[in-house]
Amino acid sequence: MSNDRQKDLRDDEPIRDRSNLQSFLFIVRKAHMELEGQDAMLARFETVKTKGHAREYLEETLPKLFEERERRHRRKGTPST
């Protein structure tokens, strides 16, 4: 977790099964795998056990995914959303 960020009280809570967070993480994980490959995704995702880990994973992964989306839109000449 970044040192400049204050720790949230829920960061140590486990990710509940069938929660919205777990569902969102699996969607991001799939996109991460398509972008960087299964080995890289699995190596990073296997450490995600708590809400704090999920926050770190999303903070690392989402900017890469958004950048790739923008790159693809520029290549196709379509506006991004």
Image (spheres, helix red, strand yellow):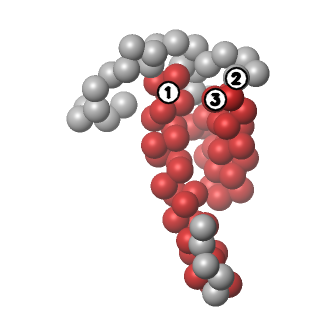
Numbered-mark total: 3
**Chain-order first, disc 1 or disc 2:** 2
| Frontmost residue, 28 versus 33 | 28
**Furthest residue to the right?**
18
Location of mark 2 (residue)? 19
C-alpha separation, residue under disc 1 versus residue under disc 3: 12 Å
Q: Are marks 1 and 3 in contact (CB under 8 Å)?
A: no
Q: Mark 1 falls on what kind of element?
A: helix
Q: Which of the labelled discs sits on residue 10, or is there none?
A: none
C-alpha separation, residue under disc 3 versus residue under disc 2: 5 Å
Q: Does the rendering let one see residue 51? A: yes
Q: Residues within 10 Å of mark 1 (few under 14, many from 20)?
A: some
**Furthest residue to the bottom?**
77
On screen, residue 61 above or below 10: below
Disc 1 marks a residue whose amino acid type is His
Disc 2 marks a residue whose amino acid type is Ser
Residue drawn at x 65%, y 45% as measured from the top left: 28
For the C terminus, give its image quadrant: bottom right
For the N terminus, give its image quadrant: top left
C-alpha separation, residue under disc 1 versus residue under disc 2: 15 Å
Q: Mark 3 falls on what kind of element?
A: helix
Residue 41 image-quadrant placement:
top right
Q: Which of the labelled discs sits on residue 53, or is there none?
A: 1
**Chain-order first, disc 1 or disc 3:** 3
Residue drawn at x 52%, y 65% as measured from the top left: 67
Q: Residues within 10 Å of mark 3 (few under 14, many from 20)?
A: some
Location of mark 3 (residue)? 21
Q: Mark 2 falls on what kind of element?
A: loop
| Frontmost residue, 64 versus 23 | 23
